[in-house]
Amino acid sequence: MLTKEQVLEKAGGEENLIRHLVPTFNPNLRKKNHKSIFSVKDSRPSMSIYKDKGIWKFKSFNTGHQGDVFRMWADYYGLDCKAQFKELLQLINQEMLLGLENDSIQDLSSFKPIISKDSTDIGENRGSLPSQILHIEYMPYGNSDISRLHLEYWTQYNISKPVLERFHVKQVGFLSYTSNSNRFLSFKYREKNQIASAYDISGRIKVYVPEISSSFSSDLFFKGQRKSFSYKNQTKDDVFGLSQLDEGTLDYVLLTAGEKDCMSAYAHGFRNVISLQSEHQILSASLLEELRKRTSVILSCYDNDVAGINASKRLETSFCIVSIPLPVDIKDLAEYFRSYSSDDFQLLLDVAIKKAMLLPLQKSFGTKSTRVSNSIRSKVEHYLSGKFDFRLNVVTQQCEILVKSKCDIWEKVNVSELRGHLDRHGISCSLDVIKCILRSFFVKQFHPIQCYFLSFEGSEISGNIDYILELSSYVKLKNRDTSHAKYWYTHLKKWMIRAVRAVFERDGINKHALILCSPKENIGKSYFCEFLCPLSLISY
């Protein structure tokens, strides 16, 4: 019988098990998000892989999947990690060709990945794992015990029945769906006396099952419940609370991490609040443009954990969105209102608004309207735009500067020298102001490799000359018959085309590699490989 330890030893550790499913994973590189293997549509990589107490774990933020490496394999193939662990080990042994002996041979052909790697037919509303074969039963807010419990849970955050109805939050009694792996899943919340809510945005839902201890209610039938993921088919463009904002110009808009925080703030008198569903959700350009048309002040108030603090910093550095910090002993905004009053939060809000008003509004996407401001930052931006051009090199991640009087000489920005230049011309500002400007939309993005290839657009070489064929002829093959020459030419061409494709497609991977072998030295192997790279791109 296969064991977990045998599989780990034969596979070479957890890292290799992860990499078999996530080819972009590298344990030696700095932690980053990967494209979710549980969702076909994941344009912004949302799966985090990290070490927790020496054990590799993962979390897919757009689908809710999380756990250790074996849970990753189980979820990927639609298995129950606990009930079908024996089958899971057999599947790993088979898929990775580990060659471990197994007494109980079983047909594993029925276990397929929940997301087909070749799938291209994706429904417009299909944003996560569950398919659209959905059956959901809502419960009216009546006099039943579970309804009273449901309202009692939300009332502790001052969220009343009218608030729930305004935000289209419904009580779920039963939910079932057939997943993409053809597994039928059902959740009988009413029968189990569990509290479950559905956030409805334009017909797309997200089912929320909060963690509640058994001591929450004296009801003998309520045994408590754990936080769980049940179903979500909302997309990254769905914004909770956006349609509930008042019409016309707003004094401010506050971004919160979760839907509960959003409703709690609204219930305490702060009406201009929306939620991006998660602190990991990136603020889109279209949403930012829409908000900027209605207000000049955008703020954030995220959870008091590492993810929330980091997300707040990203919003501030990328979009100059001021963050409202919560007391260190408070987890999130909903918990804040259980200990503090609306007047207390109004003080925090007023301070953040004043801070935001000192920052000039970024140019709106695709419009010419800007806010006239006499702030220091606006003066710095006005002066710099007249003297210099700036760009962010997305390959080196360095900000580059061009003096407009010097044609086409780009250099790395030295922030201290730039501040000295401003001082000499009568403009005093801090280094933080300059850094904030250089991280904003004031600086355009520049991809040097893409620009190199795009520069040929409109001047493509015409005629019947095959230059790749000519290039391939410079490599003298050991076996020079026609079939071998054609084989070498075909794969050189594939390599070149895929190299260019990988530049323009974010998820593109060039699986081809050119390896020139010869027992002789100094015959031009290295020279040929270097020749393949244009001189202007040699530094990359």
Image (spheres, helix red, strand yellow):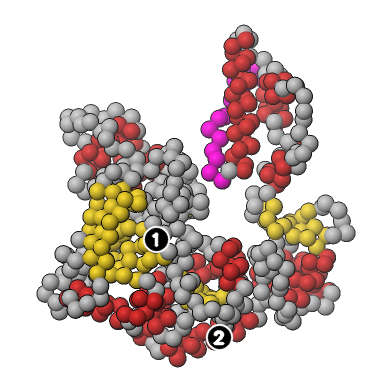
Residue 351: image tag: 2
Dot 2 falls on a residue whose secondary structure is helix
Q: Is residue 499 left or right of residue 83?
A: right
Where is residue 516 shown, x and y percent of the image? 61, 22
Where is residue 538 shown, x and y percent of the image? 71, 39
Q: Residue furthest top?
A: 481
Residue 291: image tag: none
Q: Quadrant of the C terminus?
A: top right
Identify which residue, 414 or 350, lies in the foreground: 350
Q: Is residue 162 left or right of residue 395?
A: left
> Disc 1 to disc 2, how far (Cα)?
36 Å
Magenta residues, start to end? 506-524
Residue holding disc 1: 204
The answer to whether residue 54 is above or below residue 487 is below
The answer to whether residue 411 is above or below residue 354 is above
Residue at horizontal 36 percent and vertical 67 percent from the top: 199
Identify which residue, 30 or 130, lies in the foreground: 130
Q: Report if residue 215 is visible in the image.
A: no
Between disc 1 and disc 2, the foreground one is 1
Q: Residue furthest right?
A: 405
Dot 1 falls on a residue whose secondary structure is strand
Where is residue 9 shown, x and y percent of the image? 31, 37
Residue at horizontal 25 percent and vertical 33 percent from the top: 108
The answer to whether residue 452 is magenta is: no
Residue at horizontal 28 percent and vertical 60 percent from the top: 136
The majority secondary structure of the magenta stretch comes to loop
Q: Quadrant of the N terminus?
A: top left
